[in-house]
Amino acid sequence: MGTSVETSNFAVQPTDRRGRLGSDRAAVTTSVSVRLLGPFGVARSGVAQAVPPSRKVRALLAYLILASRPVQRSALCELLWDVPDDPRGELRWCLSKIRKLIDEPGHARVRADREFVSIDRAEISVDACGVANTVEAGLARAGPDILQDLAGRFAGEFLEGLTLDRSPVFETWLVSQRHVFRALHAQVLVRLAALSPSDPERGLAYLRQRLDLQRYDETAHSDLLAALARCGRIEEGEAHVAAAGRLFNSEGLSRAPLDRAWAQAKRAATGACATRIAAEVERAIDARVGASGGRRASIAVMPFLALSGPDGNLADGLSHDIISGLARLRNLFVIARGSTFALRDQTSNPQEIGQALNVDYAATGSVVRNGNRLVVTVDLCATDNGRVVWADAYETPIADAFTILGGIAARIISSLDAEIEAAERNRAILKPPNSLDAWEAHHLGLWHMYRFTGLDNEEAQRCFKRAVTLDPTFSRAYAGLSFTHWQNAFLFKSAERLVETERAFDAAGRSLLADHRDPAAHWAMGRALWLRGEEAASVSALNEAVALSPNFAMGHYTLGFVQAQTGDPQAAIEATDVARQLSPFDPMLYAMCAARAFALFRLDRCEEAAEWALKAAEKPNAHAHVHAIAALILAAAGLLEESFREAGMIRKLRPTYSIDDFFSSFRILSDQERACRIAAKQIGIA
């Protein structure tokens, strides 16, 4: 649906929620209203008008008022007349009757010339248009009052009681319109039922009305059976299955879907009580964790909204994958699926979600069809004030949806984790250091760590040490502490490499002892083992990190870092590509590009390597080693001007830097070592 709602080969024009056509005009006053949902009727200024008894006059007015553009006279004659003696004469007679109904002095609403006929829709209210356009705007955003008003507009079938003999074209159009508006009516009733959890009788009444519209719709029967099971009305449910089964059999349809739906409804009803208890337990645990020094930020991933029925399973599956992926990262307190799905139809307000589940953040989203593409949107909100922390949208062709949604879920998982981490870092830097709890101290440490200076690295160490003192079971803080020692060994204190290497190894071991299923603990251990020269063990630890959480971008990057130097360069390229896809704005993006550049250099793809080396050097936080990688690769590629520029950056950052500093930090195979020494001589860092 775009700006108008397609109904067969005609389109309902844009209206406001009361169904006024031409609602783009400012402050118009409706003087004529037309009822199409139920017995045909016309009112002027609220006063019902006498409608001509001619069925063709009513049919013609309904057809023209829903037409999206002027209609040819010949098409109208074909629509309504079975080749009488003078079809154009009869058309003129019908138009004269319509003019008496809707025209006003000085305002001729019926527009006709020799070829075309149309109706000026300004100041005309049409009940069918109001319903169609409100549904198109999204029932999820409509409150109970609006929904009740919509339901009330369905006074009967579309053009109830109207039939035209020997007018097959019109009858085809009429059947199509009735099908469309019957489906819209059903959608309104389903939404009203969903908004009536505290009044199950009312909800059942809506579902029964919907079933009257869709007697042979399996979903309509399934929804009613599920509601009966939730209310404990098992006997009534059994009777309904038996009666509906006989109805299906009488039409040659299988009753097996009804039996399956009823069995599933009874199982779900049995587990509902357990789900409610689980939600209470989770809230109590979350509250207790939040009150302790070892708290973690918490998030509820709500069921994604599917704006078309066929996408419901896709949306639910995507929500489930995101919940599971975040839980596997072990960095956040993630509310279980049972609790968030129990709130599916109760609220989408972040602050209300926060109060119900006692969480810091809420993630909501939708799955929408846009032509032949599927659009996934996601919002991350802080529940204390409803502020949107992050939002994004992802598109995929519908034909590839099942294969690509896994990748979209991975990107959403990584982005949610990164955005919450950034928000928590920014929150921590605003607090006095001595007032920080373990979680806040850890995030202040991350803020300093990602600035990549020697002084900030020392400050990050102090923050991580405070975090593990306050909470000795805080695995992520130990991993952060290990990283600061790794940075000292690799970059800031190369003269103390052996001591810092052992400190990095010790902190990584403590991280594993605190939580051996935390991917960050295995990541820290993999880096420390690389420093110690145990490259096979390093790769094993890093593989374990990404196996525990395939969405852990740092694990993929560090695998690429190790493989790029002495391992499989093609595997390095693939690993860094995954890392960049998962975390496209990562503070370590410069390192991801540099590792990819060196892997390409090893494959003798020098032009590509030079391109990625320049990208690495241009990123924020790029340090002397990264500029050295760029300078050496550019020189090897024959780009001496760019190489000398990077050499200048190296001297600016570390005036005494030489190729020996480069080789003392990295592990380079002999072929690449020879090439690097030749390049270093060319640019004056030998």
Image (cartoon, helix red, strand yellow):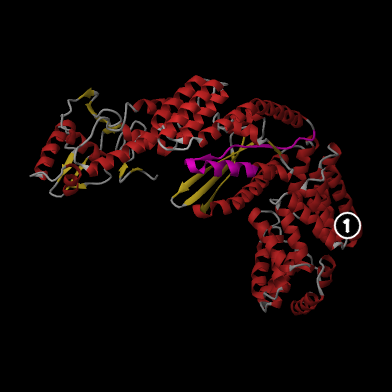
> Hey, which quadrant is residue 440 in on the image?
top right
- Density class for disc 1 (Cα within 10 Å; few <14, some 14-19, many ≥20) is many
Is 290 in the magenta?
A: no
Is 312 in the magenta?
A: yes
The foreground one among 568 and 580 is 568
Q: Quadrant of the C terminus?
A: bottom right
The span picked out in magenta is 293-322
- Which residue: 88% across, 56% down? 500
Is 499 left, or right, of 169 in this rendering?
Answer: right
The foreground one among 207 and 458 is 207
What is the count of numbered marks? 1
Q: Position of residue 290 (x, y in %)?
A: 74, 31
Q: Position of residue 439 (x, y in %)?
A: 77, 39
The foreground one among 161 and 127 is 161
Q: Position of residue 131 (x, y in %)?
A: 36, 33
Residue 453 appears in view: no
Residue 576 appears in view: yes
For mark 1, give the secondary structure: helix
- Which residue: 61% across, 30% down? 268
Q: Amino acid at mark 1?
A: Thr
Residue marked by disc 1? 501
> Hey, which quadrant is residue 615 in on the image?
bottom right
> Hey, which quadrant is residue 135 in on the image?
top left
Q: Quadrant of the N terminus?
A: top left
- Which residue: 58% across, 54% down? 403
Is 97 left, or right, of 542 in this rendering?
Answer: left
